[in-house]
Amino acid sequence: MKETNLKDKTIAVLPFINISANVENEYFCDGITEEIINALAKIEQLKVISRTSSFYFKNKEYTLKQIADQLNAEVILEGSVRIAGNKVRITAQLILAANDFHFWSESWNRKLENILEIQDEISLIIADKLREELGHLEIKEHLIESKTVNLDAYNYYLKARYHFNKWNPVDVKTSIEMFNRAIEFDPDYTDAYVGLADAYSFMATTQFMQPEKAWKKTVEYTHKAYTLNPENAGVHYLLANLSFFTDCNFADAQKHILKSLQLRPSYPEAQQFIAFLYLLSGEIEKAEHHLQFALGIDPLNQETLFYKAYYHYRTREFEKAMIIFQELLQKNPKNIPAFVVHSYCMIFQKRYDELLQKIEDIPKDILIPHEQLGIVCLTNILKGDKTNAKVQLKKLEKEAENPAAFQAHSYLFLAYANLQMFDKAFDLLERSLKMKSSVLLLSFSDPLVNDLVKDDRYLRFHEQLFGHIKKPKTIPRKKPLLDKKTATEFANKVFDFTQTEKPYLNPSVSLRDLANQVEIHPNQLSWLLNEYVGKKFNEFINYYRLEHFKELAKNPENAHISIIGLASESGFNSKTVFNTFFKKELGITPLEYLKSLDQEKNSSHL
């Protein structure tokens, strides 16, 4: 897999700091941060690091440069929240990571009851400042749509998300209570139902709750959310998981995950899942494309890293896979998927005795009995230990008689494949599919099936299981926001206005201000400056400020004014911005420039 390292227009939003007197307001700060991340992620031309990777640095001692390097981010957004009574104060600042330059900061003091509107306002301003500094972005009129008008419901929802994101059974159970409270205040709160479904899905897959009961709850709340809003990306992500893991229906899983991505292209979990489906169906290049996207916006997420390792396993790069799996297991020894596929890699490396000892020593709560039996059986088959393999095979056959013993079905299938018992393998496959044994979707195309792929029946079942996975609909290439004739007219209008009215002398002039003054939509002005004129907004404005500074500096009547004074008179409100831009444009410092003017004057007197 090719590693990408592009930072252009990439922002990481760090967890906003709680500076309230009440430490329990932490959930509120996390909620504000998450909403801003989701809002900015709606901007097509902007790459936004996902919540999981940004929150990795919460309460940890890292410099902004270190964070930016690990997240491959060009810009960092950090902020704080203070709640006092019914008032909230939010501060935010944008920093260019390369030189630790804080190019914008602002504070808002509002009533807490207006928090939903505040978040949209803040997100829009941040987006505006990003495009002024980084280049063209198309920004909608609103980035955050109110999902509930009930402040109590929203408050409980934020608390629920706070607990759910801790990913442990105790906190997830608490999140279920909080999601239910949110629904009590707003029975039509789609995201609260999505949260409930997600929480029960977690309890089912980790088996911290009786799986059948937990999946039933997942189905109930997913379909309730779908009824309320069939165009919700989270709903379709959940439907994709249900289709795959409970219905053994690859086609429906594919349909829903593609819909989820259509609704929210920057959804990291959906990008992971579609990559996973492509891996299973053997479409490696498509899998890599989506996995690279997920790694780009969520590089530190343990789940994303698992899929990266799984990609290497599926492409038979076992050493690369092993390195990542070992790192995952060091951080979380109970990472069951990592442990399992790591074991498969050891089988391919013929480290049979080491693996058998590893299975023997593993704590009992890591692997379910069928998983343990299956790995040991496979290891002994490939090791050539016929005596032990025969005993374990009989046990697997006995366990696989249970229609709900999905793991046993899967390992028995792999065992038959490696024993060259192809008739039995395909008979088992036929029976298990009727029982909706979804684990077989994982095992069918696993590298461990060995020679089974050469059997003509394999291709028939491959078509039956996976069909032909559909390619996501290609979005037609966007036409320029302005045609050539209109762009020329608008450019002349902007140049004329800037030269005559001198808006650049206002230190706080924004792209939106200039757009309003010349009566052009901000998105069109942004495109015009970047694509037609070839300058970012700040470069465009600072160019005129610099020219004005040069005119002032040449006037003998201004000799008593300091350099910074002249810069301020020209519209610059930052010494750092002035000096940096000056050196970039002229190749010398402002002081050197003034000395050169003096030398010219002296030369002219000679």
Image (tube, rainbow, N blue to C red):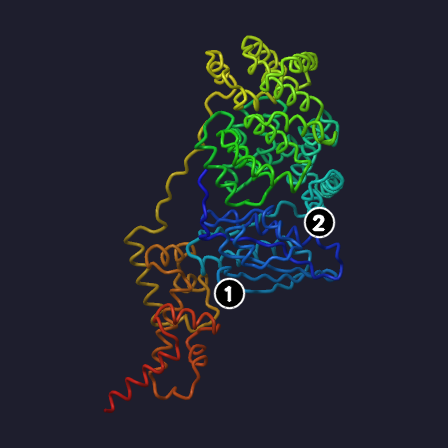
Position in image of residue 220 (x %, y %): 68, 29
Of mark 1 and mark 2, the one earlier in the sequence is 1
Can residue 522 be seen? Answer: yes
Q: Give yes or no for contact between labels 1 and 2 (Cβ–Cβ under 8 Å).
A: no
Which image quadrant for residue 218?
A: top right
Can residue 402 be seen? Answer: no
Which image quadrant for residue 534?
A: bottom left
Position in image of residue 2 (x %, y %): 44, 40
Quarter of the image with the C terminus is bottom left
User: From what the image shows, is residue 338 above or below residue 426?
Assistant: below
Q: How far is mark 1 from mark 2, CA to CA?
A: 35 Å
In the rendered structure, the answer to whether residue 235 lies left or right of residue 575 reads right
Q: Amino acid at mark 1?
A: Phe
User: From what the image shows, is residue 61 above or below residue 567?
Assistant: above
- Residue at the outermost bottom position: 606
The residue pinned by badge 2 equals: 155
What element does badge 2 sit on? Answer: helix
Q: Amino acid at mark 2?
A: Asn
* Neighbours of disc 1 within 10 Å: few (<14), some (14-19), many (20+): few
In the rendered structure, the answer to whether residue 87 lies left or right of residue 99 reads right
In the rendered structure, the answer to whether residue 538 lies left or right of residue 354 reads left
Q: Nearer the viewer, residue 484 or 542?
A: 542
User: From what the image shows, is residue 141 above or below residue 257?
Assistant: below
Query: Which numbered dot is residue 101?
Result: 1
Position in image of residue 425 (x %, y %): 57, 12
Q: Nearer the viewer, residue 134 or 206?
A: 206
Mark count: 2
Q: Nearer the viewer, residue 601 or 1?
A: 1
Q: Nearer the viewer, mark 1 or mark 2?
A: 1
